[in-house]
Image (cartoon, helix red, strand yellow):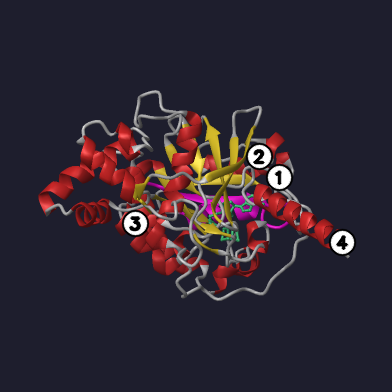
Amino acid sequence: MVIDGNAAGPYIPRPEEPMPELDLAAGAAPSVLKKADRVSLIGLTREELAATLGAALGLDAKKSKMRTTQVWRWIYHYGVTDFENMTDIGKDMRASLAQAFDVPRPEVIERQISKDGTRKYLLRMAPGIEVECVYIPDVGRSGALCVSSQVGCTLNCTFCHTGTQNLVRNLTAAEIVGQVIAVKDDLKEWPSGGEDRLLSNIVFMGMGEPLYNLDHVAAAIGIIADGDGISISRRRITVSTSGVVPQMRALGEETAAMLAISLHATNDALRDVLVPINRKYPIAELMEACRAYPGLGNARRITFEYVMLKGVNDTDAEARELVRLLKGIPAKINLIPFNPWPGAPYECSSWERIEAFADIVNRAGYASPIRTPRGRDILAACGQLKSESVKARASERLKAASSVQ
Ligand code: SAH
Ligand code: SF4
């Protein structure tokens, strides 16, 4: 989620890249999530975990199911990383597990805590694979974690800083779940699922386009939502998309997650510029896919995100058009004050303009639509921290190179 002023670094417009049909999943680079000689159990679905344990320990289907339930609870409910502490498993078997497997964590490279309690993390998943996630307190029942689904993005929405960075690769299910686990470690939120939990919601609003990485996103959601583990209900998990129409139904069917659409414009001419994927899937097709989203109803509304750009998309007429466009769709509207970044070709609308826009939307029956910027003092905008670290490394390299010459 872009929560506040975005990153430093020049804005370099890139031609639109085609939708990736390549398998961009991790695999090429070894993940630091697992130790070289041991297999990581993080990120496996229950079925995969059962197969893995069964094969390694020579168990039949029934026994591997039982072991899977035990191990799953230790990993995802209690947050245990040492097999020695899995006390309802026999000593010998614990030793065998410890020999073959690992329950690793991503490396926390940087953590910043805002005055308002927002926490921004930079995590290293594998060499060169660094992602951000942001924990925002007092969102949903108690707090939301904004996770990344890709490193960079293939799309290039003109107001988004991530859109100026090339895609490095998709994150695996393990790396998505790893973000949740690392933050739960930091919040000391084990065991999972207590009444006073700090982390109640997950939003896929960090770096990347989740629907270009649906398999791993869906597997991660299955793990995060599992009632024997982290247990964050699917209704508290929101996936935001720029509008990858062909994947929307599958998202609903495979994950039952809540859907958010980055709309940002009410006509194709403007949306083609702001969210260039619109050229492939224009507004009418997007709205049709929204109406067909599985499970849609008043209790399961779609959130429409609309970034407020001064003099670009913020007139009263556009507010009225927005309301007209969403007619008949169970919807929430989230007006996002634009988070500027150096070189960005836009400015944020004035507060008066945002309020006037919000008034029209409110009068049409949509409540509290302005997203309050959080974590201003730590620039908790996805894209910021990674860019800074990339920049720092680049300048170190430069210094090193010049001292050699
Ligand atoms: N790729 C997905 C999810 C990540 S972006 C998507 O586009 O929906 C999460 C949200 O932040 C999107 O609604 C996006 O449009 C918005 N966003 C990106 N850059 C922003 C900026 N500079 N200011 C405000 N919102 C921004
Ligand atoms: Fe940014 Fe989302 Fe557009 Fe990618 S799809 S450039 S993350 S707003």
| Circles 3 and 1 in contact, beta carbons < 8 Å | no
Mark 3, other Cα within 10 Å: few <14 / some 14–19 / many ≥20? some
Going from N to C along the chain, the mark reached first, 1 or 2, is 1
In the image, 120 versus 59, the foreground residue is 59
Going from N to C along the chain, the mark reached first, 3 or 4, is 3
Mark 4, other Cα within 10 Å: few <14 / some 14–19 / many ≥20? few
- Does 62 sit left or right of 161 as displayed? left
User: Label 3 is placed on what type of residue?
Assistant: Gly
Residue drawn at x 73%, y 49% as measured from the top left: 340
- Vertical relation: 345 (above or below) 198: below
- Does 278 sit left or right of 54 as displayed? right
Residue 141 can be seen in this image: yes
Magenta stretch in the rendered image: 297-326
- Vertical relation: 125 (above or below) 137: below
User: SS for tag 4?
Assistant: helix
Q: How far apart, in angstroms, are the residues tagged by discs 3 and 4? A: 53 Å
User: Label 4 is placed on what type of residue?
Assistant: Ser
Q: How far apart, in angstroms, are the residues tagged by discs 3 and 2? A: 33 Å
User: SS for tag 2?
Assistant: helix
Identify the residue position indicated by label 4 in the image. Answer: 402
Residue 230's image quarter?
top left
* Residue 5: image tag: 1
Identify the residue position indicated by label 3 in the image. Answer: 252
Foreground label between 1 and 2: 1
User: Label 1 is placed on what type of residue?
Assistant: Gly
In the image, 233 versus 119, the foreground residue is 119
| Circles 1 and 2 in contact, beta carbons < 8 Å | no
Q: How far apart, in angstroms, are the residues tagged by discs 1 and 2? A: 20 Å
In the image, 57 versus 318, the foreground residue is 57
